[in-house]
Amino acid sequence: MQDLRKRQNRPRLLLSFVLRAMVGLCLFVVLVFVGRAAWGMYQKFSVASNSREGAELELAELQAQERQVSASVAEFKSERGVEGKLRERYGVARAGEGEITIMRDQNTEDASAYAGDGFWASLWDALFVW
């Protein structure tokens, strides 16, 4: 039987193979560049997301600090606030004011310390020492 296919010459087959290889190589290079670009965008997005969270936390801290400073400024606007801060910071008192010291007598027993003592409380304390 006769072969009805056209016979292709070798140089034409070689040229076809080289062209297909070049197109495949170009497609591979384009794929690599596109992949690297996508990965770089992902990394930048991740860094931006983390930076945003950090900035939001810093903003919240600064807002809390601003509220505290505003409250302190409002406190200093009144006569009583200034006097209170002076007393607190420098430990001063007005003329005629004195310090009151409360001392407990160590010889008297505290009635509330023995209020729960009884048979059941002693048993509970004996069984559960911890």
Image: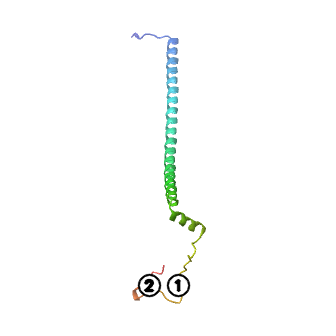
Q: In the image shown, does 117 or 1 lie closer to the viewer?
A: 117
Mark 1: few, some, or many residues within 10 Å (few <14, many ≥20)? few
Tell which tag, 1 or 2, sits nearer the viewer.
Answer: 1
Q: Indicate which disc residue 112 carries.
A: 2
**Is there a contact, CB below 8 Å, between mark 1 and mark 2?**
no
Q: Residue at x 59, y 66 (%)?
A: 89
- Tally the marks: 2
Cα separation, mark 1 vs mark 2, equals 15 Å
Residue tagged 1: 104
User: Residue at position x 50%, y 35% from top?
Assistant: 41
- Tag 2: Cα neighbours inside 10 Å, few (<14), some, or many (≥20)? few
Vertical comparison of 49 with 113: above or below: above
The one nearer the camera, 46 or 75, is 75
Numbered tag placed on residue 88 in the rendering: none
User: In the image, is residue 40 above or below residue 82?
Assistant: above
> Quick check: 23 above or below 128?
above
Residue 99, image x, y percentages: 56, 77
Q: Quadrant of the N terminus?
A: top left
Which corner quadrant of the image does residue 86 belong to? bottom right
Q: Amino acid at mark 1?
A: Arg
Q: Position of residue 51 (x, y in %)?
A: 52, 44
